[in-house]
């Protein structure tokens, strides 16, 4: 574990093997609805892989119903949404973060718009071409996914901390106000909250390795 934002630790990914499997949950399927994803992330400045899988809920490495966050040296860190019936996908990036420094990034879908935020400020806005239904029946993964190892896609390298998933669209003020604070776990629309402070000997209820502090039991298992 590597030291992260605030007290505690952060997940440290080496890009070789392993990740966190959270499982399939109705609370992580947003359908056509609004949602927000935010996290602290640090990516090495020496990175050479084209794409890194950060977090996502994606059935196949192609067009399907999914949402995921990935990084690339061209799009930076970005949210991508897709729908199998449309055979299309759209993305919104928050810029390059391959500098070895900690950055807070957030992505908010509200209707047909995605906004990206970096370090508490609006970075970009994308108007979606379609209404993307992102529901599927597969597990959510952190640091790994179905595209890892295909082409120039790789597993996460670096650190992830304070991953928060919401079933509502956060405002810029809400993101900036809470990005450096721990949540109370009672915020409306908070469906998964990973502080990622678990040490080697800590486990969650049921024996899982990574705890969801939102109260929705979206705990994760290392593999």
Image (tube, rainbow, N blue to C red):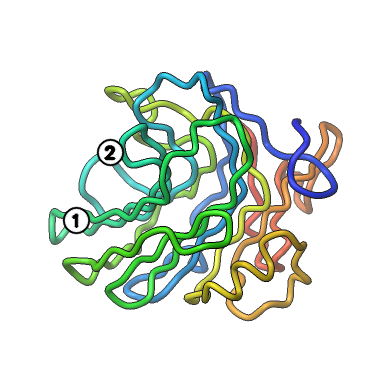
Q: Which mark is residue 61?
A: 2
Front position in the image: 34 or 128: 128
Q: Residue at x 83, y 44 (%)?
A: 8
* Chain-order first, disc 2 or disc 1: 2
Mark 2 crowdedness (10 Å alpha carbons): few <14, some 14-19, many ≥20: few
Q: Residue at x 39, y 69 (%)?
A: 109
* Quarter in which the N terminus is drawn: top right
Q: Is residue 132 left or right of residue 114?
A: left
| Residue 145 picture location, percent across and down | 43, 37
* Quarter in which the C terminus is drawn: top right
| Secondary element at image label 1 | loop
| Residue 2 picture location, percent across and down | 75, 31
| Secondary element at image label 2 | loop
| Residue 172 picture location, percent across and down | 53, 72
Q: Residue at x 42, y 32 (%)?
A: 52
The relative height of residue 153 versus residue 4 in the rendered view (above or below) is above
Q: Which residue is mark 1?
A: 84
| Residue 148 picture location, percent across and down | 39, 29
């Amino acid at each position: 574990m590597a030291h992260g934002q605030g007290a505690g630790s952060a997940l440290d990914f080496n890009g070789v093997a392993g990740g966190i499997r959270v499982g399939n949950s109705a609370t992580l399927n947003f359908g056509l609805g609004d949602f927000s994803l935010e996290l602290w992330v640090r990516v090495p400045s020496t990175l050479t892989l084209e794409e890194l899988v950060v977090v996502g809920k994606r059935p196949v490495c192609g067009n399907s119903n999914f949402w995921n966050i990935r990084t690339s040296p061209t799009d930076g860190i970005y949210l991508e949404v897709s729908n199998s019936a449309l055979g299309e996908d759209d993305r919104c990036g928050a810029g390059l973060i391959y500098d070895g420094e900690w950055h807070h990034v957030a992505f908010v879908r509200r209707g047909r718009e995605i906004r990206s935020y970096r370090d508490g400020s609006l970075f970009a806005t994308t108007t979606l071409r379609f209404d993307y239904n992102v529901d599927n029946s597969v597990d959510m993964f952190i640091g790994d996914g179905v595209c890892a190892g295909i082409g120039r896609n790789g597993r996460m390298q670096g650190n992830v901390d304070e991953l928060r998933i919401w079933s509502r669209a956060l405002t810029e003020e809400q993101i900036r106000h809470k990005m450096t604070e721990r949540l109370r776990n009672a915020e409306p629309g908070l469906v998964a909250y990973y502080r990622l402070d678990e040490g080697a000997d800590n486990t969650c209820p049921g024996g899982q390795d990574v705890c969801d502090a939102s109260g929705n039991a979206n705990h994760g298992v290392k593999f």
